[in-house]
Amino acid sequence: MKRLCFSTILTSLVIAIAFATISVVLPSRANALSGSDFNAGRIMDDGIFFNGNTLGYDTIQQFLNSKVPVCDTNGTQPRGGTTRGAYGASVGNPPPYICLKDYTQNTPAKAADAYCPGGLGGGMKSSASIIYEVARACNINPKVLLVLLQKEQSLITDDWPWPIQYRSATGYGCPDTAPCDAEYYGFFNQVYNAARQFQRYRVQANLFNYRVGVSSYVQYNPNAGCGGTNVYMQTQATAALYNYTPYQPNGPALSNLYGTGDGCSAYGNRNFWRMYNDWFGSTYAESYRWSTSGYSIYNEDKSYTVDPGRLEPGKKYFARISAVNTGAAIWTNTGYNPVMLGAGGDSRFCTAGWFACNRPALLQQASVSPGQTGTFEFPFYAPYTPGEYRESFKPVAEMLSWFNDDVNASFGIRVESPGSFSWNTTGYTIQNVAKSQYMDPGNLEPGQHYVAQISGVNTGTATWKNNGPIPVMLGLARGDSGFCVPVKWHACNRPAKLTQASVAPGQTGTFEFEFVAPRAPGTYYDHFSPVAEMFSWFNTDPDSLFGIRVASPGTFSWSTNGYRIMNQARNQDMDPGRLQRNTVYAVTLTVTNTGTATWKNNGLLPVTLAAPSNTSALCTENWYARCNRLVLLKEASVAPGQTGTFEFEFRTPIALGPYRQDFKPVAEMFSWFNDHPNQTFGIWTY
Amino acid sequence: MYLLMLRQNKTKTSKKKLLIVGGAVAAALLLGGGIFWLANRNDSTISDGNDDPTATTLDNQGETISLDPPSESDKQETEQHKQDLGNQAQNPPVGSNAVTPVITSASVNGVYAYVPGIFEEGGTCTANFSSGNQKFSRASQGFQNVQNTGCAPINLSRSDFPSAGTWNVTVTYTSPKATGTSQNQAFEVK
């Protein structure tokens, strides 16, 4: 029993290991393609067919290399008892043979048109380059072009191709039973015209036999007697393939997918579908997919493109990305699932105009069908710190699905350094506000406004500008300036921006600003220095110290012989002791300048007659200011020793009786005059 | 002593079983390998390209691209195409004056057709409609379309048909190089 048990276990072990071995070493057939998978009305989805951005040049070359590991250039391989070279020579195609991976050709330029809006430059190009450029110019999937070349002439896998295969590489201009049209000979001609024609089928769809959304008769074979069926074209790509090659595979052709069918079989569209599946995967697109050729960067008003590798710090730009709908769903920019450009997290480029900091832009078009191109556009500011910045954005159907990644979807910019900012000042000048007279900085009047001009040579490598993201301004690094004129300065630590629009290295720039001299006599300094806003301060130049001295205007003192009171018409002197109640009278006060300052009735130190008590019951509406400033000095200027006058009116109080009040001059904002025995104004009303 | 003998016997028995199991595993591996070899000994000549690719790269959207060398079926088709080209070189196609247009759709709205076997501009496609004794025709220009000559669509409306019923249409192509008429196609006019 024990031996039996051991034998049973041993046998089971052997079988188990044997099956395990088989299952490990046998390849998976789960993805095997079957003819029953072929859908005559949906050979390929538009999102796959009309997508020129799937392959880079290098990948195309890599693909071509893989399909011809060794090119039989000299035709030395055996063939039918002889060599390929000998056989080829016997039918007019002697060696050497150039394989597609090595093929080059001089190509003509092609102007952009409605079918190939990219246009093409001319010149000597490799086959990979031709396929790559035509695919992008005409927005046809380069994989489609590769399969077309194989389907028509086996050029992808042929390791000893003949010139005739290049001459009619895509079968363009080659009817089934007649010679090819020489007008379309040549590899480039063939690839370009085929791709262009695929777009023509889309743009001029109504001109052609097979149209999306329409059921049309498709034969099995050029021999009409073989029959055919009506096929409902589910995609534009499928219609295009039938317009190019108007045959569908019959049952026998589909039953033997990798071989031949019967005398009524045609293989063009079957082989296209099969080869695409084998080399590149499914011909059916997922719902939300995209491809892009990358971003274009525009200036702020979007009038021209700029090099993303040379952006200016702090400047506003617009980014625009074209997105080909390579999926099966229609994109919309409204409804429950609008398509937006999105980021995984908040973007450092986020600015006003974005929907959110992880949603730079909404799809611009109301609707983008598979195969069509949509665009996203968003503003951004280049960071102030020079360097390289990169982020990845990709579309998202909101509340539904993120799109696939794309190698070209990375948003990268490089912010260039504007250079260094330094200066060497050449000094400053001061003028009166009218700029009609230069002033001595050491003898300015208190409270007076002046205009200062500070100049300096650009000793750095950056060009100074007075606008844009880094305007150069004159600044004060610490605190506000005592010279500030708030209505004239940008801020009390920013007196002026650069006068010139641009100052290149070696040139001289100037800063001009109005300032007010402090009212108290004395010496004042500020250390102004230019600043490249948001970027850096300039060097400190010891010679840039801005200094002024405010001179004293002198002393203000007076004497007077007293007030002369007249009627309001000033044609009759009145007795101050017998004035009527509530009546207006005129007064003249003659005064003598006994100080050293010249009195003025304008400017910053106007001399007025004032009530030191700050108000007066005699006030009329004609007084200079409120009820404490009666009137300005009548004369424009009264030098020391000269005589001036104040003329004013007053209204007697309603109440009967005596009334007394002191008035005396004041140099406004500077000092009161001395007291004088005759400054008291006294009246009696009855 | 007895215990020691028992232990020695047990040790010998264990070694024996170990040898048997080891041999069985080796035999199983050989058996599995043999079955695999038998099942796949001709694979070098019958690969159909269906296997998952072993050498791959990714495209710009992350899709897999096969970088496998050409399959046997690829090679056979390539050689067959080369043979066809060789035959054509020895017996080049000369074309034919006789062509047979193909009607792809016909209805009260119009007729679409193409002409296989010829690739040219300037020919005339004429659609001839008939129903009993009633007849009329419409013509359009032929134009080059890659591998055949397309007929510009012949657009119609209900008012073009004198009566309802079953109508027949054929398309005749005429040019200096070729001429021919399609098979008849019937459609209903309501």
Image (spheres, grey):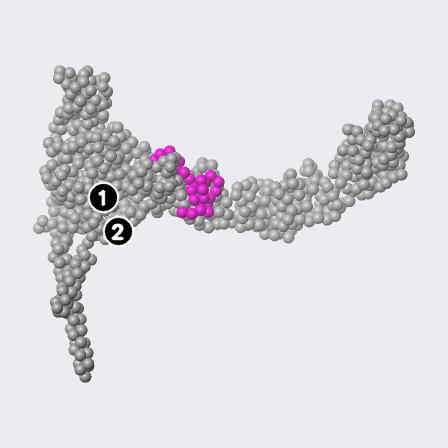
- Looking at numbered disc 2 in the image, what kind of residue is underneath it? Thr
Which residue is the extreme one toward the left? A81
Write down the region rendered in magenta: A344-368
Q: Which mark is residue B56?
A: 2
Q: Residue at x 52, y 43 (%)?
A: A469
Q: Residue at point 16% right, 71% down?
A: B17
The residues tagged by marks 1 and 2 sit, at their Cα atoms, a distance apart of 14 Å
Q: Quadrant of residue A450?
A: top right
Q: Residue furthest front?
A: A1
Residue at image x 80%, y 33%?
A630
Asked if residue A117 lies left or right of residue A540, the reply is left
**Residue A253 pos. (x, y %):** 14, 40
Left or right position of A290 against A240 = right
* Residue closer to the observer: A121 or A681: A681
Q: Nearer the viewer, residue B23 or A408?
A: B23
**Residue at position x 19%, y 35% from top?**
A245
Question: Is A485 left or right of A285, judged from the image as shown?
Answer: right
Residue A140: give x, y in percent of width and height.
28, 39
Packing grade of label 1 (10 A; few <14, some 14-19, many >=20) is many
The location of residue A628, given as percent across then percent down, is 79, 35
Residue position marked by numbered label 1 in the rendering: A276
Label 1: element kind: helix
